[in-house]
Amino acid sequence: MSKPKLISFKVCPFVQRSVILLNEKGIDFDIEFIDVYNPPEWFLKLSPTGKVPILQVDNVVLFESAVISEYLDEVYPEPLHPADPLVKAQNRAWIEYTSALYMDSFNLLMAKTKDDVNNVLESLNKNLTGLQNAKKETPWFNGDDFSLVDIAAAPFFVRAAFFKENSELDLLANYAELQAWSDLLLARQTVIYSIVEGFNEMLISRMESNQSYLSHA
């Protein structure tokens, strides 16, 4: 089997999940970034949805980040999904739940007015409350065992740290358990290595070009 190859764009949170997982398992892989707003023709021929990320394994293309993560976890040791089928199913549900956080963070990045920001924060706080209520174990989502749920949440915490640093908006101010979880994840080397060079600058540029509210608040 040849090296797996990820194709995405640099600030995609979903490909960041895959990169963290690949790093956790010590897998040698290639990655190629494209302009998602002007994708090359060869990419559109590979991706059934026209979306990123995709993973190429030999001559096979996988799409959808959760599917990519499941494949990588099954093929390469050691598994990061719980062995118990019921706990595994719960974990899959919470992985899906975290996807809403990425939509919220993107909408926050793009919000043009204070009212837009407040509407996003209302949705985000609802989603964060649900996640904190589920996060009863420490240090990780499943207790002592680092898992795919931790990986699924990590890119959101990267973005929450960005907002705190660049807009003074502390998304985790009222979520002490999530802040503690975030601190652990952001200090983990596999998460640190998943953040592309110039990440903050790219998000700031995106906000400014969109004339987003937080870029001048």
Image (cartoon, grey):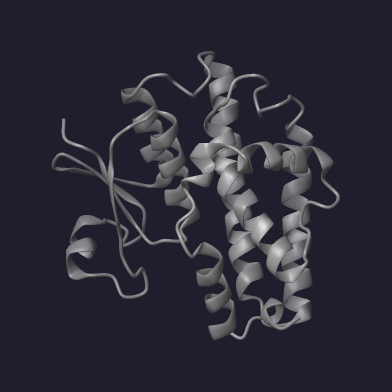
Quarter holding the N terminus is top left
Residue 109: image x %, image y %?
62, 70
With 175 as the anchor, is 66 left or right in this view?
Answer: left
In this rendered view, identify the residue nearer to me: 160 or 132.
160
Vertical placement of 48 versus 200: above or below? above
Q: Which residue occupies 41% across, 36% down?
A: 23
Relative to 96, say whether 142 is above or below: above
Q: Hey, which residue is sitting farthest left in the picture?
A: 59
Picture quarter containing residue 7? bottom left
Rendered residue at 38%/62% (across/down): 9
Residue 138: x percent and y percent? 73, 25
Return the x and y of residue 97 as percentages of the image width and height: 61, 43
Quarter of the view holding residue 51: bottom left
51 left or right of 44 in image: right
Residue 5 is left or right of residue 69, and the answer is left
Residue found at x 36% / y 57%: 52
Query: How many badges with numbers are in the image?
Result: 0
Residue at screen point 78% across, 67% down: 168
Q: Position of residue 31 (x, y in %)?
A: 30, 51
**Placement of the C terminus among the 4 image quadrants:** bottom right
